[in-house]
């Protein structure tokens, strides 16, 4: 998809790929042939520009056809660069205005509770969203309503459009912050598949009476060494001769 445009949010996509793989092929309950199934777990993409990563997961899950991926970012495509629920099957919300996803997730989780629907709501957000006041209002609301069907996934890659997250707003002890608000909180290496799976199981299986959060430390452009070392990785421009090199590096790292 990125090669079609010559650029894109591939740094985030490679970094969060393990989290998405574990979510869609281990944790989530859904029906590929019926994306609107009422009993499905909802997966919300608060960070709309990560759509390129979610499209890949939706394709692997059988919700999107593979041949449609080449239309990524084009006019009239169902796969815009920033996720839009009105266009794409399996895209639960239109994300992109950072700080909104968790609030929507709280509303969905509360609605499911009141309808006695046992489904879970998963909300994938970024570390940059931890600087938004609306996020922390949603954190408090989730506890207030006892939403034990809400699981927040935080992609902590320490990268924003203008530089490192830590330089935009002080970060640190994030797990303790969430726990202090009343959430079941855990922090793991988001590029360690075994750790990701174990954390998702713990979040869903805990008897904690309120919402749950897993903070995943990830590395931008994970798996492509010559991209990982670039200073600017928020929106990556890849030269024409580098795409085949990147794919070769990724293929070499795949389990045989």
Image (cartoon, rainbow, N blue to C red):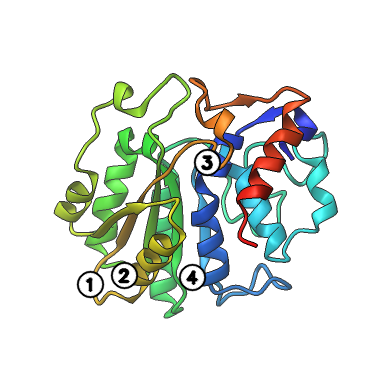
Residue 95, can we see it? no
Q: CA distance from mark 4 to mark 3?
A: 22 Å
Q: CA distance from mark 2 to mark 4?
A: 15 Å
- Residue 118, horizontal then vertical, whole percent: 44, 79
In this rendering, the answer to whether 115 lies above or below 93 is below
Q: Residue at x 77, y 47 (%)?
A: 78
Quadrant assignment for the N terminus: top right
Nearer the viewer's eye, disc 2 or disc 4?
4
In this rendering, the answer to whether 40 lies above or below 106 is below
Query: Cβ–Cβ below 8 Å for labels 4 and 3?
Result: no
Query: Cβ–Cβ below 8 Å for labels 2 and 4?
Result: no
Q: Which mark is residue 254?
A: none
Q: Is residue 189 left or right of residue 14?
A: left
Q: CA distance from mark 3 to mark 1?
A: 35 Å
Q: Which mark is residue 209?
A: 1
Residue at image mark 4: 27
- Secondary structure under tag 4 reads helix
Residue 202, can we see it? yes
Q: Which mark is residue 148?
A: 2
Q: Is residue 52 left or right of residue 195?
A: right
Residue at image mark 3: 222
Nearer the viewer's eye, disc 4 or disc 3?
3
Q: CA distance from mark 4 to mark 1?
A: 20 Å
- Residue 107, horizontal then vertical, whole percent: 41, 58
């Amino acid at each position: 998809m990125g090669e079609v445009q010559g650029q894109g949010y591939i740094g985030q996509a490679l970094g969060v790929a393990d989290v998405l793989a574990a979510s869609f092929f281990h944790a989530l309950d859904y029906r590929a042939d019926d994306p609107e199934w009422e009993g499905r777990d909802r997966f919300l993409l608060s960070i709309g520009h990560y759509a390129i990563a979610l499209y890949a997961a939706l394709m692997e899950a059988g919700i999107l056809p593979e041949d449609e991926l080449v239309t990524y970012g084009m006019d009239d495509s169902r796969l815009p660069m920033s996720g839009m629920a009105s266009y794409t099957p399996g895209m639960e919300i239109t994300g992109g205005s950072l700080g909104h996803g968790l609030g929507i997730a709280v509303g969905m989780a509360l609605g499911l509770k009141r309808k006695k629907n046992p489904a879970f709501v998963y909300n994938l957000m970024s570390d940059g969203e931890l600087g938004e006041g609306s996020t922390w209002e949603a954190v408090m609301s989730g506890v207030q309503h006892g939403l034990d069907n809400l699981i927040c996934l935080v992609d902590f890659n320490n990268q924003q459009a203008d530089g490192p997250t830590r330089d935009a707003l002080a970060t640190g002890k994030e797990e303790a912050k969430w726990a202090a608000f009343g959430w079941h909180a855990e922090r793991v290496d988001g590029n360690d598949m075994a750790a990701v799976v174990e954390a998702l199981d713990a979040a869903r299986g805990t008897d904690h009476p309120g919402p749950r959060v897993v903070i995943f430390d990830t590395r931008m452009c994970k798996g492509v060494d010559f991209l990982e070392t670039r200073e600017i990785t928020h929106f990556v421009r890849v030269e024409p001769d580098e795409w085949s090199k990147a794919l070769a590096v990724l293929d070499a790292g795949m389990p045989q």
